[in-house]
């Protein structure tokens, strides 16, 4: 039971890395980005390729993050930027098109066969946690996700960049009127969100096989997290990520035991049932900021 609790927490932290990217982009740019899951996929593939070439997980990680950020900047400049003044439907269609394109590019470059990433040798063993052995790599994922979340909170609340991000989320016209380059700010936020998704994909590489469209199911759960927590709320993203991580982990264990074959179906639906319940009582999510809609 305790091991599954750690697994649920670790899964929730991975979802948190994805969710804060979606939250940042929507909170600042009012952009619903369906291409976010593709950056998860790109991060995993780039890490795997560079790891095979260099043998260094750390070089592979840095390359994956930089590669995803550069790709995000190119996409923002060429496709996403014209969408800022368009409606959400246009944004959804365009970013969905990016997802389909990147999925096919992955097939052309890497093929359809699953790609695996080796666990770094330093983190390949187990460590004792409350009397039972637990994979050191899973603990490392949790630690990196927590550290990243804390750094992001510091960036948003304690730095000039964070001040501009928060001001741009509240009133982008006023920020532009003060002489701030809002267009550049949007590019940086989009790149940062993509980097976080690539970080999640890179760290997931040793746990799940990288294959075309691997980011799509993760994106669906990420959007569920953001809907529950509230668009634009980092606190909501954190709480909802943990909730969804725990529900998904324990639901897949106990629902089949209690209900048999029907339990598998319920386990797959459980997170979405919770989301529907939350949105019924709080349509803006649990922690939606004032003025967000």
Image (cartoon, rainbow, N blue to C red):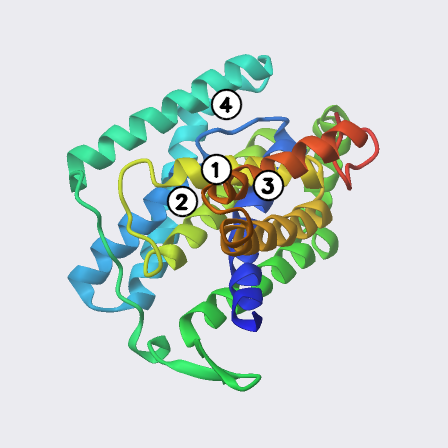
The residue lying at 77 percent from left, 40 percent from top is 286
Write down the residue under mark 3: 271
Quarter of the figure that contains the C terminus: top right
**Callout 1–callout 4 Cβ contact below 8 Å:** no
Viewer-proximal residue among 108 and 180:
108
SS at mark 2 in the image:
helix
Q: Nearer the viewer, mark 4 or mark 2?
A: 2
Q: Nearer the viewer, mark 3 or mark 1?
A: 3
Residue 229, image x, y percentages:
70, 41
Q: Residues within 10 Å of mark 4 (few under 14, many from 20)?
A: some
SS at mark 4 in the image:
helix
Write down the residue under mark 2: 40
Q: Report the Cα–Cα distance between label 1 and label 2.
A: 9 Å
Q: Residues within 10 Å of mark 3 (few under 14, many from 20)?
A: many
Residue 130, image x, y percentages:
57, 84
Q: Nearer the viewer, mark 2 or mark 3?
A: 3
């Amino acid at each position: 039971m305790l091991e599954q609790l750690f697994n649920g927490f670790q899964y929730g932290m991975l979802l948190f890395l994805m969710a804060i990217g979606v939250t940042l982009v929507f909170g600042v740019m009012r952009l619903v980005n369906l291409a976010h899951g593709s950056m998860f996929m790109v991060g995993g593939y780039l890490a795997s390729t560079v790891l095979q070439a260099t043998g260094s997980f750390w070089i592979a990680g840095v390359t994956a993050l930089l590669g995803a950020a550069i790709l995000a900047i190119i996409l923002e400049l060429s496709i996403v930027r014209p969408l800022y003044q368009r409606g959400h439907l246009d944004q959804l269609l365009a970013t969905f098109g990016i997802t389909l394109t990147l999925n096919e590019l992955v097939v052309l470059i890497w093929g359809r066969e699953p790609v695996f990433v080796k666990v770094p040798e330093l983190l390949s063993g187990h460590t004792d946690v409350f009397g039972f052995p637990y994979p050191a790599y899973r603990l490392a994922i949790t630690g990196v996700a927590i550290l990243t979340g804390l750094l992001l909170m510091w960036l948003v609340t304690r730095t000039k960049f964070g001040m501009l991000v928060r001001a741009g989320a509240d009133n982008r016209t006023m920020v532009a009127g003060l002489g701030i380059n809002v267009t550049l700010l949007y590019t940086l936020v989009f790149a940062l969100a993509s980097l976080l998704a690539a970080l999640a994909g890179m760290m997931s590489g040793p746990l799940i096989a990288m294959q075309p469209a691997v980011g799509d199911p993760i994106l669906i759960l990420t959007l569920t997290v953001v809907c529950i927590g509230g668009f634009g709320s980092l606190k909501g993203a954190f709480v909802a990520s943990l909730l969804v991580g725990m529900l998904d982990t324990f639901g897949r264990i106990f629902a089949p035991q209690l209900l048999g074959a029907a339990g598998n179906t319920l386990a797959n639906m459980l997170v979405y049932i919770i989301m529907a319940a939350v949105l019924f009582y709080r349509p803006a999510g649990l922690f939606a900021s004032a003025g967000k809609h």
